[in-house]
Amino acid sequence: MVEPIRSDSPVLVVGLGRFGAACAGELDRLDRDVLAVDSNLELVQKWSERVTHAVQADGRNLEALRQIGAQDFDVAVVATGSSIEASVLITANLVDLKVPQIWAKATSLSHGKILSRVGANHVIYPEREAGERVAHLVSGQMLDFIRFDDDFVLAKMFPPKFIRGVSLADSGMRTRYNVTVVGVKSPAKPFRYAEATTVVTNHDLIIVSGTNENVERFAALDR
């Protein structure tokens, strides 16, 4: 069981390619202290004014990580993905430095298995997840799609005709399709939590939760 980490804990990001830079930049936007590390001096200089700290160091070298204080972080992101050997070495070094939570980017399932075995707490598959998401969006009526590990998904879509103009409770959608509307967005208004008495209109968007199969079936209904 992975221990929870404080939401304001500083984050170490190793690798400033597109994935690592996007992660470091967003963490900085969320007011998290970030130490971004890369062996490429040009990338370090590029990001030095966009995150809390950026340093040039080779994460494959245990002593180099120790010198920049990697062992003092509770959370680290291994964002290097072009070299499997490098990402595995960096992850193993962070494990040796006893970093409590390590998130590591993988380019394949076999790569991910190796990262897990050397000690990564969370393995991320950005390319695969992005591909799956796009497949759902282009093949159906969904406007956005998020899958979780236990086959639970959230999807944004226009409501099917049969639930429009009646309360969600009266529509019978949970009984018939085993999905739940958890949020509704009306034009020019923010999303709001859905309730049993909520009535969805022709102009609304809905957030639906359920298993992948059930949400796919619900998304295919007549609109």
Image (spheres, grey):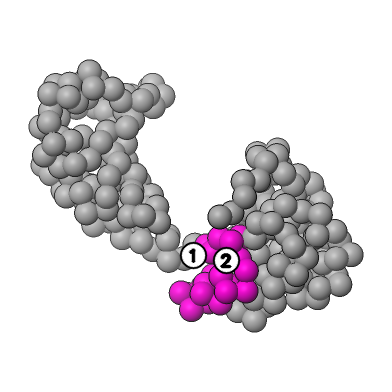
Q: Position of residue 130 (x, y in %)?
A: 42, 60
Disc 2 crowd, CA 10 A, few/some/many (<14, 14-19, 20+)? many
Q: Tell me the residue that label 1 is attached to.
A: 125
Disc 1 crowd, CA 10 A, few/some/many (<14, 14-19, 20+)? some
| Residue 140 visible in the displayed image | no
Q: What's the residue at 20%, 46% (across, down)?
A: 219
Magenta stretch bounds: 103-124
CA gap, disc 1 and disc 2: 6 Å
Kind of residue at disc 2: Lys
Q: Is residue 135 left or right of residue 32?
A: left
Q: Reading the chain from its start, which is encountered first: label 1 or label 2?
A: 2
Q: Is residue 31 left or right of residue 218?
A: right
- Mark 1 secondary-structure assignment: loop
Quarter of the figure with residue 115:
bottom right
Kind of residue at disc 1: Tyr
In the image, residue 189 lies in the stretch drawn in magenta: no
Which labelled disc corresponds to residue 105?
Answer: 2
Q: Position of residue 24 (x, y in %)?
A: 67, 52
Q: Are marks 1 and 2 in contact (CB under 8 Å)?
A: yes
Q: Nearer the viewer, residue 210 or 222?
A: 210
